[in-house]
Image: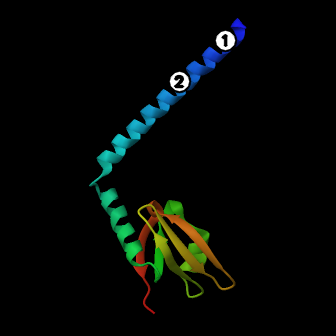
Amino acid sequence: MEYAAFVFAIFGLLAYLQSASLKNRVDALERTLGKMKGTEQHTRLASLSDAAQSYIGQRVQISLREDHQDIDIINWGNTKYGSITILDADEDWILVHIERKNKSVDKLIRLESVETISVLKD
């Protein structure tokens, strides 16, 4: 009986330490995000978000950052064989419809991975 109480006490201590560590990590992340407001990265994401929300329903050309490339956007989205239409957008994500030669695909793209968005003229 004493052994079981000791084991539960150890697990309780480990759970407490884990939650305290998580709380410290969340606080550090909140401080970092607070410092980021007003910086160039924050304003770039805000302007991309505004642009994406204003282009909903329109055909666009999207270029992604080099480390976030997507094969559908590279092969079909910005070519004469396919097109990208923005279906929905918010401050973190863009939902796009990629029309391909044989079929179409809906993709959710993280706004951090987008380099530029421009409207295609028909």
Residue 66 location, x and y as percent?
49, 63
- Of discs 2 and 1, which sits in the foreground? 1
Residue 32 location, x and y as percent?
35, 43
Disc marking residue 37: none
Residue 38 location, x and y as percent?
26, 55
Residue 80: which quarter of the image? bottom right
Q: Quadrant of the N terminus?
A: top right
Q: Which residue is mark 1?
A: 5
Above or below: residue 109 compared with residue 21: below
Q: Which residue is mark 2?
A: 16
Residue pictured at 54% horizontal, 28% vertical? 18
Judging from the image, what secondary structure is the residue with disc 2 in? helix
Residue 13: which quarter of the image? top right
Q: Residue furthest front?
A: 1
Between 54 and 122, the one lying in front of the other is: 54
Judging from the image, what secondary structure is the residue with disc 1 in? helix
Between 109 and 13, the one lying in front of the other is: 13
